[in-house]
Image (cartoon, rainbow, N blue to C red):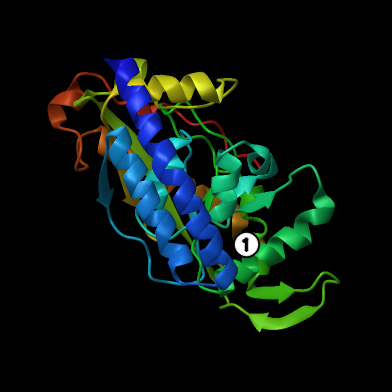
């Protein structure tokens, strides 16, 4: 049954997606406003096909410029977050080379960061700055990698280092380009918590079905998840934190990490909307594992 389900999902998504990709290319080329909203509907369609049931706690801040700092569990995080509102992602450069996923990331106007080439830092900072100045909401997975889903890893303050430069856009020579953002960048912590599989508490033993981390190959992981069944996930929005200058990036990273971990613990302990107290009593408080010391 699981194999038939996986094949059916792949066939339907495979039929629907290519025409929408062409349409998105046209929207991007013509500057149509639909280029922002079409990905939202596509991600909602994918989540429905996968059986993802989403609960949103809190709301996205209306403040701009807005940078979302989220924990990272799976490739599915992108579909879940992007089904809520028009978003673009800050991704590692390797993603751009991935078949299909790389094309989809480009069509969603992702900004790709090559961490091995520091000479490109200003160029990337300016690209992100331009997007934020235009009102786009950017998503940064602040752990710098994906986790096993049982804990929130330390947020890397180095990944927020570029944010303070967004207050002034510069050209390739480092000179002011004439546009300015507001004095503070608003960093909003967002927690993704996968809670149930086929209606039952997911727990530590089943979370690897969703979590994609380490050296796990994407293909087998994708196939297993397609076979798995319905998945419940909570997306919790925390209070925005103002980042004014580079001196504050470490404190902002720590505060955002603390906020995300707290929201994860709250949901898994049954004080969120998706998990009852009885489940928490059964010993599924995996988010309460101690975190490593903040680095970066």
Say which element carries label 1.
Answer: helix
Q: Which part of the image, by quadrant, shows the C terminus?
A: top right
Q: Nearer the viewer, residue 249 or 87?
A: 87
Is residue 83 visible in the rendered image? The answer is: no
Q: Which part of the image, by quadrant, shows the N terminus?
A: top left
Q: Residue furthest bottom?
A: 178
* Residue 61 drawn above or below residue 119: below
Q: How many callouts does the rendering have?
A: 1
* Residue 215 drawn above or below residue 16: above
Residue at x 79%, y 73% (from the top left corner)? 171
Q: Quadrant of residue 109?
A: bottom right
Q: Quadrant of residue 272?
A: top left
Is residue 221 visible in the rendered image? The answer is: yes
Q: Quadrant of residue 243?
A: bottom right
Q: Does residue 103 appear left or right of residue 66 in this picture?
A: right
Q: Tell me residue 30's x, y (percent).
A: 56, 72
Which residue has dot 1 on it?
Answer: 163
* Residue 236 drawn above or below residue 38: above
Residue at x 52%, y 48% (from the top left corner)? 254
Q: Nearer the viewer, residue 46 or 294?
A: 46
Q: Tell me residue 16's x, y (percent).
A: 40, 44
Q: Tell me residue 98's x, y (percent).
A: 63, 36
Q: Does residue 252 appear left or right of residue 282 in this picture?
A: right
Residue at x 42%, y 29% (from the top left corner)? 149
Q: Give the class, few, some or many, for how many residues have Cα within 10 Å of label 1's Cα (few <14, many ≥20).
A: many
Residue at x 43%, y 52% (from the top left corner)? 189
Q: Does residue 113 appear left or right of residue 279 in this picture?
A: right
Q: Does residue 150 appear left or right of residue 179 in this picture?
A: left
Q: Tell me residue 67's x, y (percent).
A: 51, 60
């Amino acid at each position: 049954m699981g194999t038939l389900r996986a094949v059916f999902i792949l066939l339907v998504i495979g039929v629907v997606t290519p025409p929408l990709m062409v349409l998105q290319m046209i929207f991007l080329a013509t500057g149509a406003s639909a280029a922002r909203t079409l990905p939202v509907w596509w991600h909602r369609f994918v989540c429905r096909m996968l059986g993802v049931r989403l609960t949103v706690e809190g709301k996205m801040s209306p403040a701009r410029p807005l940078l979302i700092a989220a924990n990272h569990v799976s490739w599915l995080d992108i579909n879940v977050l992007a089904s809520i509102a028009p978003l673009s992602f800050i991704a590692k450069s390797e993603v751009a080379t991935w078949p299909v996923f790389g094309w989809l990331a480009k069509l969603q106007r992702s900004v790709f960061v090559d961490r091995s080439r520091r000479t490109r830092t200003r160029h990337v900072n300016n690209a992100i700055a331009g997007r934020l100045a235009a009102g786009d909401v950017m998503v940064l997975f602040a752990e710098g990698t994906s986790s096993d889903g049982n804990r929130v890893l330390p947020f890397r303050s180095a990944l927020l280092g570029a944010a303070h430069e967004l207050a002034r856009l510069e050209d390739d020579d480092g000179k002011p380009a004439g546009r300015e953002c507001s004095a503070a960048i608003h960093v909003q912590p967002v927690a993704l918590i996968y809670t149930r599989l086929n209606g039952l508490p997911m727990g530590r033993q089943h979370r690897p079905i969703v979590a994609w981390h380490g050296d796990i190959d994407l293909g087998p992981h994708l196939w297993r998840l397609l076979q798995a069944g319905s998945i419940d996930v909570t997306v919790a929005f925390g209070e925005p934190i103002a980042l004014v200058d580079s001196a504050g990036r470490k404190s902002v990273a720590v505060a955002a990490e603390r906020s995300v971990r707290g929201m994860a613990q709250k949901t898994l302990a049954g004080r969120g909307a998706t998990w009852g107290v009885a489940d928490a009593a059964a010993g599924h408080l995996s988010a309460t594992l101690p975190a490593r010391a903040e680095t970066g």
